Amino acid sequence: MPEPFEPRIVAFFCNWCTYLAADLAGTSRMKYPPNARVIRVMCSGRLDPQFILKAFADGADGVLIGGCHPGDCHYQEGNYKCLRRFNLLKRVVKEMGIEDDRFRLEWISASEGDRLRSVMIDMVDKVRALGPLNWNASVEEVAVS
Amino acid sequence: MKPKVAFYWCAACGGCEEMVVDLAEGILDVVAAVDIVLWPVAMDFKRADVEAMPDRSIAVAFINGAIRTTEQEEWVHLLRRKSQVVIAVGACAQMGGIPGLANFSNRAGVFQTVYREAPSTLNDAGVYPETIHKDNGFTVTLPRFFDTVKALHQVIDVDYYIPGCPPTPQLLSDAVTALLSGKLPEKGSVLAPDQALCMDCPRKDTKPERLAISEFKRPHEVLIDQEKCILAQGLLCLGPATRAGCGSRCIEGNMPCTGCFGPTSRVRDYGGKILSAIAGSAASNDEAEIARILDKIPDPAGTFYRYSLPVSELQRKRL
């Protein structure tokens, strides 16, 4: 029997809010699916769109960005930069044939461990329902015909 | 004996051939220094002529155009075998170029548009190109058309790149001079300055310290100020992420940069990089207002990957 599909989510969490929320969820022993590979960045504003595109190209089934709530950025405006880039990048990613639910931006503060848990559960469910993205294979498939 | 040089074209518009012609009388210097052994646009050579040459007997092959058919693929493999140095000339050979936009579709989609739906197409019989066609006892063949367009280095090993759509004659003659003198840069180099166009821009002093754009506009909607930074005027000028070396031709013509020189050496994905610069300059912190500002940019993927879709991280649309 083939193994059931487990989505691979690449999660970019900012050092000051969402990464601490993940820490809190862990120390509070909250249970959520272990599908995310978390990459800590100092600020969601540090996220170069190239990172997200590379994650998809290299096999991620979904990409989640977690940053501080608007107004709460440790660097004052970094999350707004992220928000602007996300808006445009979301359109690009969609034009490339990647479904909306595979790419998500969430504001999660350091105290919102439970919110981190519910976002993770929701995203993994939605991506699981979409199935594997398997970027290289889908590119190759059309290339050889 | 003069070094042998070949020029070849693949999926391209012919603009790169025009660049050679634009050397004007400079072409006489080139012809005096080298022996042109292949140049389909201007001289009569057959594939058998090239096949008959000893391997590595051509000093340099200048190849322009993207690869989208089996014929082009065969030709560039042949030229790679016969040449010591291969230079990818122009945006199509370097990054896929305009033909690379076909990676938003596939062969079936391209054929449907070109042979069926285009307003200028008359094809009531529904004839499409076939690789093998038999008629009246005769068999004729055509090269196969790929679903995915590729840049030259995705098909054969490439030594150097001359960027541009088309490149300037200056870049070509600089490359020829460098080759003849043996002063070659590191393999894989792009033979143009490794800095952003903004550094070279005649209007760079008018570029504000911090760009804040509250309204994106398209060239046909406004009269563009001839002195001020074009991006600061709200037009999508891709200079911040585009390699210099073009002589700011579009800017001099009062038009925004569309990014034909591709990225500098530090960038992996051109579209992602320019998207970052453009989106970051939207002048708002409010989600709805940001959406309103950025919605004025039509087709962001096609705009930011206009010349580089096949070499981008994602390479093509998933169908």
Image: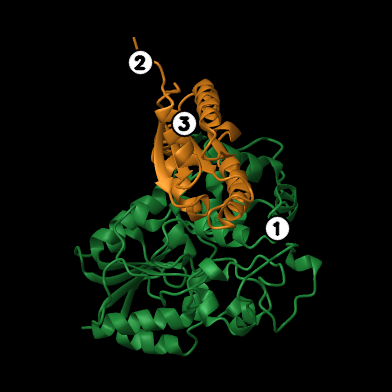
Chain colours: A orange, B green
Q: Distance between the residues labelled 2 and 3?
A: 16 Å
The answer as to whether the residues below labels 2 and 3 share one chain is yes
Check disc 1 and report the residue beneath it: B284
Q: Distance between the residues labelled 3 and 1?
A: 33 Å
Of the residues under marks 2 and 3, which one precedes in the sequence? 2
Where residue A35 appears, x then y in whole percent?
Answer: 41, 27
Which quarter of the rendering shows the N terminus of chain A? top left
Count neighbours of disc 1 (C-alpha within 10 A) and say few if under 14, some if 14 to 19, many if 20 or more.
some
Check disc 3 and report the residue beneath it: A133
* Residue sitting nearer the eye, A68 or B243: A68
Amino acid type of the residue tagged 2 in the rendering: Glu
Badge number at residue A3? 2
* Residue sitting nearer the eye, A101 or B110: A101
Amino acid type of the residue tagged 1 in the rendering: Ser
Residue B315 placement, left or right of B253: left
Q: Distance between the residues labelled 2 and 1?
A: 47 Å
